[in-house]
Image (cartoon, grey):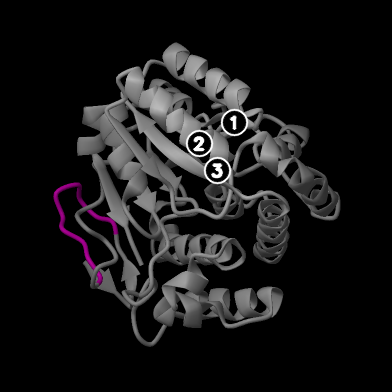
Amino acid sequence: MVSSGRVMIGAMTEKVSFSRALSSSPAPLMSSGYKLLFPGQGSQYVGMTSSLPSPLPPSIKDLFLKSSDVLGYDLRKYCLRGPQEVLSRTIYCQPAVVVGSLAAYRMLDEQIRNEVAGMAGFSVGEITALIAAESISLEQGLLLVRERARAMNDACLERPSGMLTIIGLEEKALEECVLSASSQTKEPLSIAGHLFQLGYTVGGTMESLKALKSLAVSKGAMSIKSIDVSGAFHSPLMHSAVEKVEEILDTIDISLPSVPVYSNLSGDQYGSISEIKHGLSWHLVEPVLWHQTMNQMITISGEEGFIEVGPGRQLKAVLRKINKTAFNNCTNVDV
């Protein structure tokens, strides 16, 4: 049911929706609790946040006001109206995805805060998870996202680069292709993300990616697609951004999260503040271990109760490739 614009979670068979925000009833809650997944860059779209109630609930209105203060512009205007070429720019889409996801989270927050077994976020979504888990304050989290996006954008401008999604190769075969393409072109190239078994992202210069495509096809890759991002994220080409993010992290107050938050860098739960700082900076140049993270969450907390919180349905689609039972017990809270 819907009350005062806030999603209410009741019996596991109850249907819940507010406009497009909740695609189906919440995943069945078992004793292990809910697992919340926060999306990353690439899930943004023009029109996001249009499903939120009107007028905005006070907590959501406050979220957008604070985001405008920190970012220095009206973020929701870009979310609602775009244009797409602006919203897709790293400096805008990362804050948009984080704030949009937090808006969706706040629609659920009061109902599930005591029933969450763990949180994980893909790339910048990890910062969303840490804000939601009260490890980082909203204002400082938004500052971190703003500076992270700027640092990554600067790294992209230093050297043109991009990313591919490659499906159908074993990790060893893909590593051989990556090494060969990098050797041929004498350009940097590396695996940037472990999505699911036989599913990976790769980041590198445009020349090295072109060489990789030919090699991957010859090895039997089933699908090779370009990713609509401005650079080779989670690869050594982002190295110049690491120091800048570390400097910002040194100015931010971080505490241990109120619920377990999983690290992109290790695939395990964060256990200390130093781990959080290290993870948030160094995952810029290291692959996102999403496959490993999902398996760890399932091992610890079970296959039920997954909720993707934020724009799009990309993480749910990836979950289908990892564990079909978890996918069948996963729902989305879109904005």
Examine the rendering and report whether any part of residue 261 can be seen.
no
Give whichever of discs 1 and 3 has the lower sequence position. Answer: 1
Q: Residue at the spot x=69%, y=57% of the render? A: 157
Label 2 close to label 3 by CB (< 8 Å): yes
Label 2 close to label 1 by CB (< 8 Å): yes
On the image, the x and y values in percent for residue 118 come to 48, 38
- Disc 3 is placed on an element classified as helix
Mark carried by residue 189: 1
Q: Badge 2 is on which residue?
A: 209
- Disc 2 is placed on an element classified as helix
Q: Badge 3 is on which residue?
A: 206
Label 1 close to label 3 by CB (< 8 Å): no
* Magenta residue check for 314: no
Q: Is residue 287 above or below residue 237?
A: above
Q: Residue at the spot x=46%, y=66% of the render? A: 100
Q: Amino acid at mark 1?
A: Leu
